[in-house]
Image: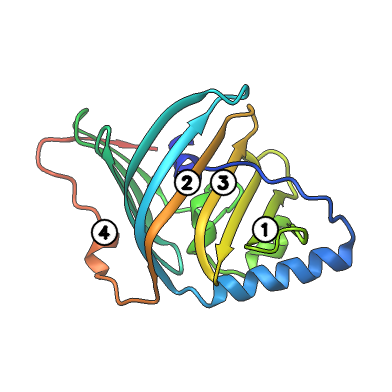
Amino acid sequence: MNVLSRIFTGLLLLVSVTAQAADDQAAAQLRKQLDAMNTLQGDFVQTTYDKKGVEQESSSGNFMLMRPGKFYWKTLAPMQQLLVSNNKTIWLYDPDLETVNERAFSDDLRETPALLLSSDIAQLRKSFTVTRDEKEKSAEKYTLTPKVTEGMFQHLTLVFKANQLTEFAIQDSLGQLTRCVLSNVQRNQTLPEEKFFFQPPEGVEILKD
């Protein structure tokens, strides 16, 4: 389901730190940031660009994330769409098409990068090479490159300001670039468990992968 990668959008950040020691340090720093974030909620604006940098589409909505493996990503404009995971099942609901795509949960971060923010952080070093842009002083910017290249994306970037996640970005294997800017972000708030389970409305078509 390629749509899962669309919830990670942004501007690709390339860094030049390649030494193994630097990778160890960057991974530890990123793990510290993510370990401090058990839940996250807020609003997003997502923009997708083609490989030439031309804007293709933009959307906005709100989200909730809870580790491990739970997320609620609701697109409100220009068209409504809802992506939900309860750590066992992933649902994609399109109210206009009256369809629900349902698939078994996978904890493979290479195939479902959305899980990066809600997964077992121990998988970071196993799945990615992690680097940090040391030249950037106003924010912490981390680039994750999959160690196995068959996945859906080439690079994933996370941006933190004042220890708060403010942006993430992805470039896929076809050169498509997306960017997601977060606002009104709150972390470690109590979130309603029912948000992470989806009950298909009566009459919609259920498509199972």
Q: Of the residues tagged 4 and 3, which is closer to the observer?
A: 3
From the image, tell me which residue sits under label 3.
169
Helix, strand, or loop for circle 1? strand
Q: State the mark number for residue 197.
A: 4
**Dot 1 amino acid type:** Tyr
**Are the residues at dot 2 and dot 3 in contact (C-beta closer than 8 Å)?**
yes
In this rendering, the count of numbered labels is 4
Helix, strand, or loop for circle 4? loop
Residue farthest toward the front in the current orientation of the protein: 138
Q: Is residue 83 left or right of residue 9?
A: left
Instruction: Point out the tag, 2 or 3, that comes first from the N-terminus.
Output: 3
| Quadrant location of the C terminus in the rendered image | top left
Q: Of the residues tagged 1 and 4, which is closer to the observer?
A: 1
In front of the other: 54 or 93: 54
Q: State the mark number for residue 142.
A: 1
Q: Residue at x 70, y 48 (%)?
A: 146
